[in-house]
Amino acid sequence: QAYVGESGGGSVKAGESLRLSCRASGDAATGNYMAWFRQVPGKEREAVAGIRMRDGTPYVADSVKHRFTVAQDSADIAMYLTMNSLEPADTAMYLCATGSFKYSGFWNLTKFYGYWGHGTRVTVSS
């Protein structure tokens, strides 16, 4: 069976930090990329950060690269998203996904990810 699970979301105030975790198992753990996306009702799902699993190469969206970092857990099929200096605009459901594809430039495209978690909610108040 395939499983992707997220944890670490919560409610914080602007300027605070959160660390999200994602783990994959079963068929979902066979992909070579893991990524975080976020979604707000009425808007398209937005790529936040990703990892190429074979070597831990990180990818972070320009919109958050000065505040968010992503890292791989080398002991597991897992990754972490550390979000600093959170802003109300970061409020969203954060979803983890895994996928298999060759071109790293596709890391931020939802259509290349076949397994998705249910998400963890992040709420940032001003």
Image (tube, grey):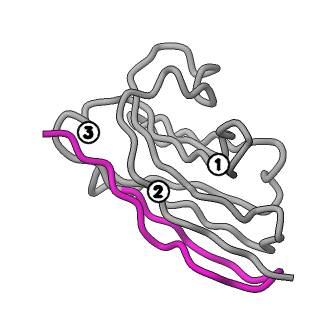
- Residues at circles 2 and 1 in contact by the CB criterion of under 8 Å: yes
- Is the residue marked by circle 2 packed among few (<14), some (14-19), or many (20+) residues within 10 Å? many
Mark 3 highlights which residue? 29
> In this orientation, which residue lies closer to the viewer: 9 or 40?
40
Answer left or right for 28 relative to 104: left
Answer left or right for 34 relative to 44: left
> In this orientation, which residue lies closer to the viewer: 16 or 69?
16
Which numbered disc covers residue 39?
Answer: 1
- Is 14 contained in the magenta span? yes
Q: Earlier in the sequence, mark 3 or mark 1?
A: 3
- Residues at circles 2 and 3 in contact by the CB criterion of under 8 Å: no
Image quadrant holding the C terminus, namely: bottom right
Residue 94, given in percent of the width and then of the height, sits at 56, 56
Quarter occupied by residue 18:
bottom right
Residue 120, given in percent of the width and then of the height, sits at 49, 64
Mark 2 highlights which residue? 119
Quarter occupied by residue 123:
bottom right
- Is 13 contained in the magenta span? yes
Image quadrant holding the N terminus, namely: top left
Q: Earlier in the sequence, mark 2 or mark 3?
A: 3
Answer left or right for 1 relative to 76: left
Span of residues in magenta: 1-22
As helix, strand or loop, the secondary structure at mark 2 comes to loop
Q: CA distance from mark 2 to mark 1?
A: 9 Å
Name the outermost residue toward the front: 42
Q: Earlier in the sequence, mark 2 or mark 1?
A: 1
Q: CA distance from mark 2 to mark 3?
A: 17 Å
Three-letter amino acid code of the residue under disc 2: Gly
Q: Nearer the viewer, mark 3 or mark 1?
A: 1
For the point 74% across and 83% down, the residue is 16
